[in-house]
Image (spheres, rainbow, N blue to C red):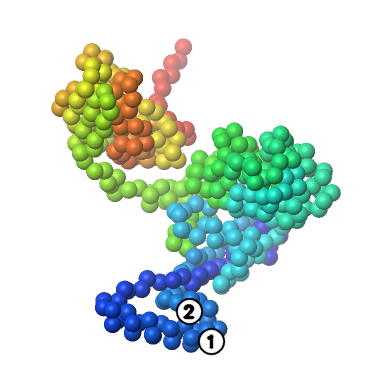
Amino acid sequence: MNSDVAISVENLSKVYRIMGATKPPDTFRDALVGAGASFGKKLAALAKGDAYAAIGGDMEDFWALKDVSFEVKRGEAVGVIGRNGAGKSTLLKILSRITEPTEGRVRINGRVASLLEVGTGFHDELTGRENIFLNGAILGMSRAEIRAKFDEIVAFSGVEKFIDTPVKRYSSGMRVRLAFAVAAHLEPEILIVDEVLAVGDAEFQKKCLGKMQDVSGEGRTVFFVSHNLSAVKRLCSSGILLSNGAVRVPLGHLGNVIDVYQAEMKPASEGNDFPYLGDNEFGSIEIWCFEIVRSSNSDSSDADILQIKGLAKRKKSTPINVGVDVFTADGEHLLRSMCTDSQEFIDSNGVEGDFHIKLSMPLNLINNGSYKVRLISSAHQAGWLIPPGEGPALTLWVDRLFNVSPYWTRARPGLIAPQLSWLDS
């Protein structure tokens, strides 16, 4: 194995035997005959030592991974992305020697620290202090090494006040803080992390990313699985896309991997059911139509038009407002706009009766990519009719050529990409 390679995976496959679906009997007689046949099969399976078949039912093979191959260089930060069930966690469990592969070979060159689940290896009855020593020993740290780093681990975790409290009384956030602190301070040559950022507050997530960046910056290898694409982009320079247990996009530049992933995640339709109803004691709203009308002249300065049709009824004198929330593909809240941003709707006190309104989304403001646009509605300062996150949604795609300036031949970095005015004074 080349000394510059930290992880080498060759034709890796993992199969599980799972219970297959069985057709129910049509008649009582069929059920009796089937029960006799099933009993005979179980006895035969036990005689052969086939425990799976002896359990009963038809067993079938499920390939969680199939012919996966890649190489990770020393000091590389690799993001592993893919839908749920793509095989990401199975891959990490094999790399961490938690489970054996069915086929293929894995070679790892260096000391490995894995954080795959919250508080893996923690004993509920032991205190945080005792679990640091226990978990550190499980990860391969000597007692002297744990003692030398104990104060740093506790400070990083932020649970100093509860360090002598049994961890069974810890919240899930406290447990993952402590677990990550122990794993991160092992000073591994290879750090394997699976969705640790799904737990914890924003401050903790920022601290975790910073620590992993430190690990990567010191020439050590990071193998990071997360659905948080913002975190993956911040930490990793390369990535691999898994789909149905196989490599969909080989290990390479992270931007290319994410582009393919996001394109495949693009929904053909949001499946909104209309009319969409919202109601509270101050009013009600019925949404008949929520759609994007693409501008016919789609150059870089044009806008897409969001069209909304419906019926609003006030139960009291409270105005009814309609608006949208816009999110990036990574789930970041980009902006919120309500119809009362325009003087016309301030003067008319929102929407009333049958309405047909439009919102202009300027494409020369937001950057290339996909965005989720979700409808919201409220009775002004009196509660939601359609709460944030629950209303009809659209996917807005921005793909412009930046042809206003001949000096921009590719997409600009950043969430927004406005073309600002520069003056030569």
| Number of marks present in the image shown | 2
x and y, in percent, of residue 211 in the image? 66, 40
x and y, in percent, of residue 309 in the image? 19, 32
| Rendered residue at 18%/29% (across/down) | 311
x and y, in percent, of residue 286 in the image? 21, 33
Q: Are marks 1 and 2 in contact (CB under 8 Å)?
A: yes
Q: Nearer the viewer, residue 42 or 149?
A: 42
Q: Residues within 10 Å of mark 1 (few under 14, many from 20)?
A: few
x and y, in percent, of residue 139 in the image? 72, 55
Where does label 1 land, which residue?
48
| Helix, strand or loop under label 1 | helix
- Residue type at mark 1? Lys
* 224 lies above or below 285: below
| Rendered residue at 41%/47% (across/down) | 262
Where does label 2 land, which residue?
53
* 202 lies above or below 259: above
